[in-house]
Amino acid sequence: MIRPWPLKQSRIEVQNRIFTLCTKTAVSPLTGREHDFYILEAGDWVNVLPLTKDDQVLLVRQFRHGTREVTLEIPGGLIEPGQTPEQAAARELLEETGHAGRLSLLGRIRPNPAILNNWCYAFLARDVEETEAKHLDESEDLELVKVPLEQVPALIARGVIDHALVLSAFFLLGLDQRRFKGANGET
């Protein structure tokens, strides 16, 4: 039977606004030996799958520094202190796209439990409409792209959409709707 590894010590290596890198020393319940593990402690995140009334998905194209590439994603970001996941989803959608809509939780995902301790909450925003100009953070540069929902599986299959958390949101939408096409209509 798999058992938790007792934690012997934890020390902070690096800390900033986005994450804390910790070294955690744990003891193997099988061998009794100590091992160091490097964990990124981060606040929870949200991502939002925005759909217009005519089943267009609002995607954002942006440069990602980790891969040094331009990606195609859905809006998302950190849950700020004092915010609920739904409030953060509404804020991120408005900031990154200038749109608002009816939010519903699709589910929550562990981004990478091997090295991260947080959750990502995936929301569906239905009937999104532009309500104001987008207002990006100083370090953001986003281009808004509308794509018919029915074309998303092909974009995923071709690797155009390849961000794991974005793929998870579309997967959860498929579970929620039991189909990919016509998510704003009857199922």
Image (cartoon, helix red, strand yellow):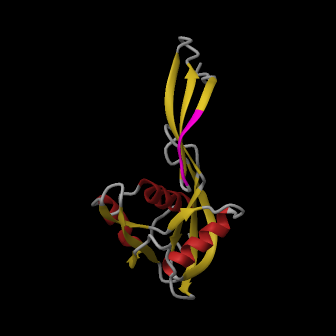
x, y (%) of residue 24? 56, 30
**Front position in the image: 135 or 179:** 135
Whole-percent x, y for residue 33 in the image:
53, 14
Residue 144 lies, with reference to residue 13, above or below; the image says below
- Residue 104 in which image quadrant: bottom right
Q: For the magenta stretch, what is the residue range? A: 11-16
Q: Is residue 161 above or below residue 25?
A: below
Q: Does the magenta portion include 175?
A: no
Image-based side of 33 in relation to 148, left or right: right
Q: Residue at x 67, y 69 (%)?
A: 87
Residue pictured at 49% horizontal, 79% vertical? 97
Q: Position of residue 76 (x, y in %)?
A: 52, 65
The quarter in which the N terminus is drawn is top right
- Asked whether residue 52 is in view, the answer is no
What secondary structure prevails in the magenta region? strand
**In which quadrant will I find the C terminus?**
bottom right
The answer to whether residue 77 shows anywhere in this view is: yes
Q: Position of residue 152 (x, y in %)?
A: 38, 67
Viewer-side residue, 89 vs 108: 89
> Residue at position x 45%, y 76% from top?
58
Q: Reply above or below: 61 against 28.
A: below
